[in-house]
Amino acid sequence: MPTARDVRICFAGDSYVAGTGDPACLGWVGRVSAAAFAEGRRLTSYNLGVRGETSSQVAERLEAELAPRLSAGDERRLVLAFGVNDTVRVDGHVRQSLAQSARALHRALDVAGRATTLVVGPPAVDDEAQNARLHGLGDAFAEVCADRGIPYVDTFDATATDATWRREVREGDGFHPGAAGYAALAAVVQRPFLASLAST
């Protein structure tokens, strides 16, 4: 009987990775990981989501986070998902410019090294001015990924037009949905995520 492959995958990002607001405590990460198991894919999934962090903050801690988790294993994988906190206004200023966010993504991809990587873009929030910034940020992230040959999942358009996502975000804290909203986000990410697991 063949030995099962040791597949390790880190999900690094912000509160959406952590699943903030989900009473089921699954978020989209737990749901897409469960979908992989349902397809017969066995993996060790590490959730490295930290609430409130910008893309630069995630990139800054990434090397230290990945080293103990991906130093071994037959397959080493990484999913990066951040950006909403970059576009938040604090004292009249956006926390990060598009250029800073793009540089942070480049840095995170450099740190990823040989790990097979997927980038998941930021979803919509309950603030149209911020959503305009998020749309632009998603375009910038998509361009970085195209330049680096990394697959990119755009979640903004789908969540901006999804009634369940918008309702739960609005009824919550303006950013995070409940279980049904995270299920809707997971549905956007699931197919490209499973496709990425089939790649080497």
Image (cartoon, rainbow, N blue to C red):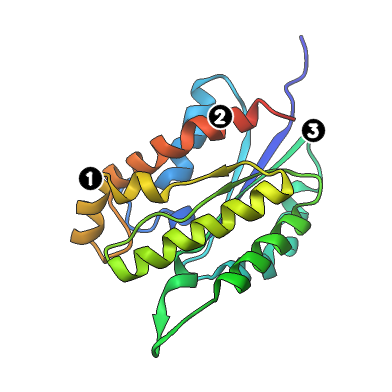
Left or right of 56? Residue 131 is: left
Classed neighbour count for the residue bearing mark 2: other residues with Cα under 10 Å, few (<14), some (14–19), many (≥20): some
- How many angstroms separate mark 2 from mark 3 (CA)? 18 Å
Assess whether mark 1 and mark 2 are in contact (beta carbons under 8 angstroms). no
Residue 52 in sight from this viewpoint: no
Q: Could you tell me the amino acid type at mark 3?
A: Asp
Which amino acid is tagged 2? Leu
Q: How many marks?
A: 3
Secondary structure state at the residue bearing disc 2? helix
Residue 175, x across and y down, in percent: 32, 63
Task: Work out whether mark 1 precedes mark 3 in sequence or the reverse, and give the earlier one.
Answer: 3
Against 187, residue 88 (above or below) is below
Q: Amino acid at mark 1?
A: Thr
| Numbered disc in front, either 2 or 3 | 2
The residue beneath circle 3 is 74
For residue 164, the mark is: 1
Estimate the x, y position of residue 191 in percent, counting from the top left: 49, 30
Residue at left offset 57%, top offset 59%: 140
Percent x, y for residue 4? 72, 22
Cα–Cα gap, marks 2 and 1: 24 Å
Asked whether the residues under the numbered discs 2 and 3 touch, taking CB atoms below 8 Å apart as contact, a structural biologist would say: no
Q: Which quadrant of the figure has residue 77?
A: top right
- Mark nearer the N terminus (2 vs 3): 3
The answer to whether residue 196 is above or below residue 185 is above
In terms of image quadrants, where is residue 149?
Answer: top right
Question: Gap between marks 1 and 3, in whole Å?
Answer: 39 Å
> Where is mark 2, residue-wise?
194
Give 51 or 119, whichever is nearer the viewer: 119
